[in-house]
């Protein structure tokens, strides 16, 4: 029996077209994305014609060029083996929270779908998503020169691009804080690459399924991978708000006052270190900070 698609270390075009639910032949080429998701395999969906030009080249103003094919969408294949439809519904409900509370301009829209995944005689339910691909670069809240990086992303587009970018980022922060306080849901902002900024200053969250819950108690919540995602997401939000947007620290902010308590942050660092050590040892190292 072939190896389960969720367990393969890398995925090729042939791996994807061999799946029973993928139409073949197709006008699309599938390429493993350079960033690995913690909960899902990320596959670029490319126009076959663009891949041919990338491979064979094209003449532009008398020069042979090899332009890199740009994805038209992202195929996400969830790694989890769900024990029931109820568990799957929980994953989908996380996305619905963003749909309801976050402007479409601030998240990568996705169509979630279930398929019967077959390997020989074995069948299982697989959750997938066909997601908008956001052309841009990561907003890294942990980078010491995060604002300069943003200036580099929008540089050369138009004079007001940086102002637009910061306004969009401020709008995003305000929306996320509103979601947290009104629903108790905390989107994952901790991973480097979870938030993308376009060259025109647009800001979009691309990790749309990892939603943790607001718990104002002294127990530090870790997700099913052992990562203190709630605390790290609040820390990332604070970094964006203060380091990038330059907002003054609001000593009356209940959220930050609780989650950024020095003793709590020390315990979070210990949990984070333990998580990275275990992940590195297992060879399943995710792209989180």
Image (tube, rainbow, N blue to C red):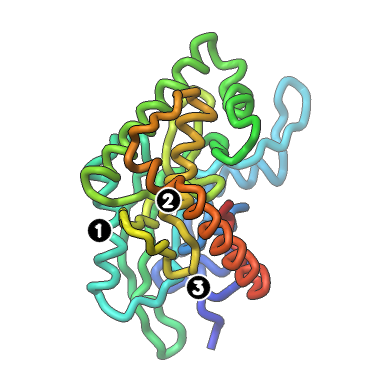
Vertical comparison of 177 with 110: above or below: above
Vertical comparison of 74 with 22: above or below: above
Q: Secondary structure at mark 1?
A: helix
Query: Residue 185 appears at what percent x and percent y?
Result: 29, 51
Mark 2 = which residue? 188
Q: Are marks 1 and 2 in contact (CB under 8 Å)?
A: no
Mark 3 = which residue? 6
Q: Say left or right for 18 vs 84.
A: right
Residue 27 in view of the camera: no
Camera-side mark, 1 or 2: 2
Q: Which mark is residue 93?
A: 1
In primary-sequence order, the first of circles 1 and 3 is: 3
Q: Secondary structure at mark 3?
A: loop
Q: CA distance from mark 2 to mark 3?
A: 22 Å
Residue occupying image coordinates x 37% and y 40%? 107
Instruction: Please count the marks in the image.
Output: 3
Q: Say left or right for 63 vs 257.
A: right
Q: Residue furthest front?
A: 263
Q: CA distance from mark 1 to mark 2?
A: 15 Å
**Along the line of sight, which residue is nearer the eye, 274 or 22?**
274
Q: Quadrant of residue 141?
A: top right
Mark 1: give few (<14), some (14-19) or many (20+) Cα within 10 Å. Answer: some
**Along the line of sight, which residue is nearer the eye, 155 or 52?**
155
**Along the line of sight, which residue is nearer the eye, 254 or 64?**
254
**Along the line of sight, which residue is nearer the eye, 143 or 205?**
143
């Amino acid at each position: 029996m072939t190896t389960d698609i969720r367990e393969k270390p890398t995925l090729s075009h042939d791996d994807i077209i061999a799946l029973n639910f993928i139409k073949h032949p197709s006008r699309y080429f599938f390429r493993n994305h350079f960033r690995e998701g913690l909960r899902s395999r990320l596959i670029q969906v490319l126009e076959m014609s663009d891949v041919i030009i990338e491979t064979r080249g094209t003449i532009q103003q008398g020069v042979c060029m090899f332009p890199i094919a740009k994805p038209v969408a992202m195929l996400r294949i969830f790694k989890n083996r769900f024990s029931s439809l109820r568990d799957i519904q929980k994953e989908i409900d996380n996305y619905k929270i963003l749909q309801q509370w976050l402007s479409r301009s601030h998240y990568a829209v996705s169509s979630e779908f279930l398929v019967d995944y077959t390997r020989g005689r074995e069948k299982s339910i697989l959750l997938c998503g066909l997601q908008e691909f956001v052309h841009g670069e990561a907003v890294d809240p942990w980078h010491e020169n995060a604002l300069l990086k943003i200036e580099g992303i929008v540089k050369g587009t138009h004079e007001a691009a940086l102002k637009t970018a910061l306004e969009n980022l401020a709008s995003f922060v305000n929306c996320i804080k509103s979601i947290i306080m009104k629903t108790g849901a905390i989107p994952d902002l901790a991973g480097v690459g979870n938030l993308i900024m376009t060259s025109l200053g647009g800001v979009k969250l691309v990790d749309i399924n990892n939603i943790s819950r607001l718990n104002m108690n002294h127990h530090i919540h870790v997700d099913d991978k052992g990562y203190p995602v709630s605390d790290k997401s609040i820390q990332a939000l604070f970094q964006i708000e203060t380091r990038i947007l330059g907002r003054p620290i609001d000593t009356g902010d209940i959220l930050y006052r609780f989650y950024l308590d020095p003793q709590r942050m020390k315990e979070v660092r210990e949990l984070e270190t333990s998580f990275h050590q275990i992940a590195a040892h297992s060879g399943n190292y995710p792209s989180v900070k």
